[in-house]
Image (cartoon, helix red, strand yellow):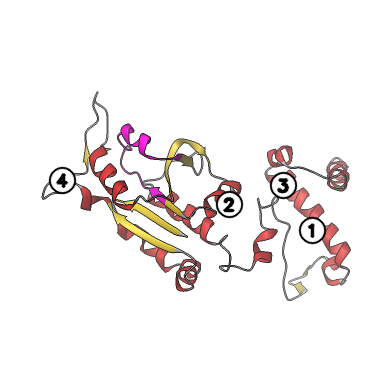
Amino acid sequence: MKISILTMFPEMLDSLKQAPIIQHAQAKGIAEIEVIDIRQYADGSFRDIDDSPYGGGAGMIMRVGPLKRALAAVKDADCFTILSAAAGVPYTQKKAHEYAAKTHLIILCGHYEGMDARINDEVDEAVCIGDYIVSGGEYPAMIITDSIVRLLDGVIKKESTEEESFENGLLEYPQYTKPAVYDGMEVPSVLLSGDHEKIRLWRRKESLAVTLKYRPELLDESSLSKEDQRMLNEIKENMHE
């Protein structure tokens, strides 16, 4: 898979390229991360890429010309182009899987007060990583890239990602490792029992409990089995005791 990131500040992506998972994926030929400097497609010796907004207002707007030329230079027949925007669809684990199935993903990074709206006709989708504002699209680009690359076959063992938070619609259950007792705090005995079915049920119930406590709205969107519903009812009853 190829991911092309178009940015005004390519140096901001240096830490992404140095991340262990990204380096591992590129070394194995599973992913290719390409960073494009939009300024190289701006006019004039000063590489002017932004200007004041028509109609007045604070801040500067990225000009449509350099953006279109940069996109044209990297687009191919298999590409899918996205940009981060407050008006975009919510970025979720499901969306990460959708993007991971693409052959060539192009991420357009905004900056300042945003982009000339005429660039919207050149992208396939706008996504929003959350209801907050960051200083530039480079941050969402790094989050999106990392979340996609780790899903690609051969990057991480499949079993390591299958039960992570959001993969099955719920938050992940608590995890523990050695020692079994630390500073008077003990690992739940069921995890030391060797009984795989009891461990499975414990983990599922804990996953439901954590989700109910921190992200209850996810339960409304999840397909819960009869077993799940029974355990969830037990959790709720215990909360009221």
Check residue 35 in the rendering and tell me which mark sits there, or answer none.
Answer: none
Kind of residue at disc 2: His
Looking at the picture, tell me which residue is in the foreground, 55 or 29.
29
Residue density around tag 1, few if under 14, some if 14–19, many if 20 or more, within 10 Å: some
In three-dimensional space, the C-alpha distance between marks 2 and 3, rounded to whole angstroms, equals 21 Å
Q: Can you tell which quarter of the image residue 183 is in? A: bottom right
What residue is pinned by disc 4?
43
What residue is pinned by disc 3?
211
Across and down, in percent, residue 234 comes to: 88, 45
What residue is pinned by disc 2?
97
Residue lying at 24% horizontally and 25% vertically, measured from the top left: 56
The magenta segment? 106-125
Kind of residue at disc 3: Thr
Across and down, in percent, residue 79 comes to: 42, 50
Residue 202 seen from this side: yes
What residue is pinned by disc 1?
203
The reply to whether callout 4 and callout 1 are in contact (CB within 8 Å) is: no
